[in-house]
């Protein structure tokens, strides 16, 4: 922007009678060493404005101090900065609160606040705001409930996985970090890192990934484990969907094209929970139950509701175990291959991890990892993924302060 378009405001900070040397900490009378003027970017809604700030240097009168002079601080301006703190804060708030990007914020500063700031300058301001923040201190302010949700996800622009830890009760992301390999040792190292951040859960909710239980027991020997109900039913749906696909294929091979078309058209409605179906879906299901009564379609709906009953309506763990045993006694595993896999899925020791919530009512049946991962992916999407592990964690710290602490930290 041409020089003549700028309006310059002169800022002369008040010079105190007494000053404190930042090197030796001695309080002493002010004695001037020299001064200079610095042009600083600032915001103004009316016209392009810059500040002409007087920077004053004071002598250190302590003969034992190795620093002979020091610069007096200016409120709202860091040492050597070419932009005011409020301009930087506005830029960082736009990135975090509005889920925007550095190029967009740079254009917004020019359009709305009559000032300039390149995308690299905005990125630098963001890193400066995050690098002085202590992740452990931030997490201590988040009010961790003691019930941890843990899940893995594949970040954008990354060939490895990240683990995301969150609070099951307060629905807050606590920490995100990279794991080089998907094995128990990496998960255990991640959990040890959570310990160093001051997180000591008494219960952990996670999906059905094999390394999770062993690693959790090594890091926290007395921890309670709860498998996420969402992932349990996701596995059940996978097998039921395969059973339905196999039955449809059989109809097609027999030349029952109309029946095949009905099932294909309603393949998603069939597996929906009854309470989630629309009026149109309910009408379609009434027709399907009439046509396919006594077939695999009818049996899979019955089996699904029996499984849901175990988790939704059991009052105790013993009742859940009895309902599971009833499925075995009724020989559901002999009906077809896919039902056998479902019954096998519930027959192992891991079933005890699925019903921990029935013995400990404080533990939720489901975690919140999927919702928080979806939220985090929205932040990744606008910037095509974070470039580095450090950049991802810096963004998380700023997000926690803005979203969970209302911008109040420390």
Image (cartoon, rainbow, N blue to C red):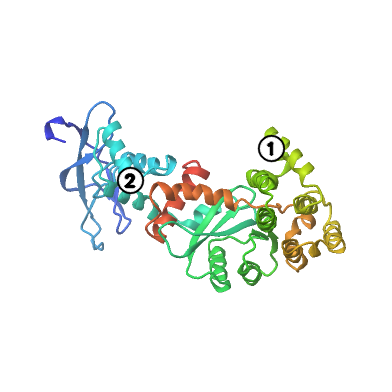
Around disc 1, counting alpha carbons within 10 Å, would you say few (fewer than 14), some (14 to 19), or many (20 or more)? some
Instruction: Look at the image and tell me whether residue 141 can be seen.
Output: no
Q: Which mark is residue 27?
A: none
Mark 2 and mark 1 residues within 8 Å of each other at the beta carbon: no
Q: Is residue 170 left or right of residue 392?
A: right
At horizontal 84% and vertical 51% (from top left) the residue drawn is 315
Around disc 2, counting alpha carbons within 10 Å, would you say few (fewer than 14), some (14 to 19), or many (20 or more)? many
Q: Which residue is mark 1?
A: 281
Instruction: Look at the image and tell me whether residue 159 can be seen.
Output: yes
At horizontal 71% and vertical 52% (from top left) the residue drawn is 365
Residue 387 screen position, x and y as percent: 37, 57
Q: Work out whether 4 lies above or below 182.
A: above
Cα separation, mark 2 vs mark 1, equals 45 Å
Q: Is residue 210 left or right of residue 397?
A: right
Which element carries disc 1, helix, strand or loop?
Answer: helix
- Residue nearer the viewer, 15 or 324: 324
Q: Quadrant of the N terminus?
A: top left
Residue 352 screen position, x and y as percent: 76, 64
Q: Work out whether 240 lies above or below 1.
A: below
Which element carries disc 2, helix, strand or loop?
Answer: helix
Q: Which residue is mark 2?
A: 102
């Amino acid at each position: 922007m041409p020089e003549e378009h700028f309006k310059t405001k002169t800022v002369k900070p008040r010079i105190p009678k007494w000053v404190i040397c930042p090197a030796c900490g001695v309080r002493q009378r002010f004695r001037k060493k020299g001064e200079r003027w610095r042009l600083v970017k600032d915001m103004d809604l009316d016209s392009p404005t810059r500040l002409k700030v007087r920077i004053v240097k004071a002598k250190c009168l302590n003969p034992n101090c190795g620093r002979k002079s020091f610069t007096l601080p200016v409120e709202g301006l860091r040492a050597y900065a070419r932009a005011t703190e409020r301009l930087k804060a506005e830029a960082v708030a736009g990135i975090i609160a509005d889920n925007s990007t550095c190029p967009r914020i740079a254009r917004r500063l020019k359009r709305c606040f009559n000032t300039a700031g390149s995308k690299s300058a905005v990125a630098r301001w963001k890193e400066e705001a995050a690098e002085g923040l202590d992740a452990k201190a931030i997490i201590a302010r988040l009010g961790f409930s003691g019930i941890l949700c843990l899940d893995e996800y594949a970040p954008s622009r990354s060939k490895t996985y990240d683990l995301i830890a969150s609070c099951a009760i307060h629905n807050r992301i606590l920490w995100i970090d990279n794991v080089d390999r998907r094995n128990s040792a990496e998960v255990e190292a991640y959990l040890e890192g959570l310990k160093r951040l001051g997180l000591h859960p008494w219960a952990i909710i996670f999906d059905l990934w094999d390394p999770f239980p062993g690693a959790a027991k090594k890091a926290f020997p007395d921890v309670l484990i709860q498998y996420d109900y969402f992932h349990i039913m996701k596995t059940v749906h996978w097998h039921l969907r395969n059973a339905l696909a196999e039955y449809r294929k059989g109809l097609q091979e027999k030349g029952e094209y109309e029946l095949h078309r009905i099932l294909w058209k309603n393949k998603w409605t069939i597996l929906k929970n009854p309470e989630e179906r629309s009026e149109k879906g309910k009408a379609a299901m009434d027709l399907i139950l009439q046509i396919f009564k006594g077939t695999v379609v009818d049996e899979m709906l019955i089996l699904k509701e029996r499984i849901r009953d175990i988790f939704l309506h059991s009052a105790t763990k013993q009742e859940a175990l009895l309902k599971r045993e009833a499925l075995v006694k009724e020989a559901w595993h002999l009906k077809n291959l896919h039902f056998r896999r479902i019954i096998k899925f519930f027959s192992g020791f891991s079933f005890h991890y699925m019903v921990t919530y029935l013995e400990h009512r404080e533990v939720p049946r489901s975690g919140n990892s999927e919702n928080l991962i979806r939220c985090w992916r929205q932040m990744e999407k606008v910037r095509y993924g974070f470039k580095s592990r450090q950049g991802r964690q810096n963004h998380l710290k700023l997000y926690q302060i803005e979203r969970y602490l209302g911008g109040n930290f420390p």
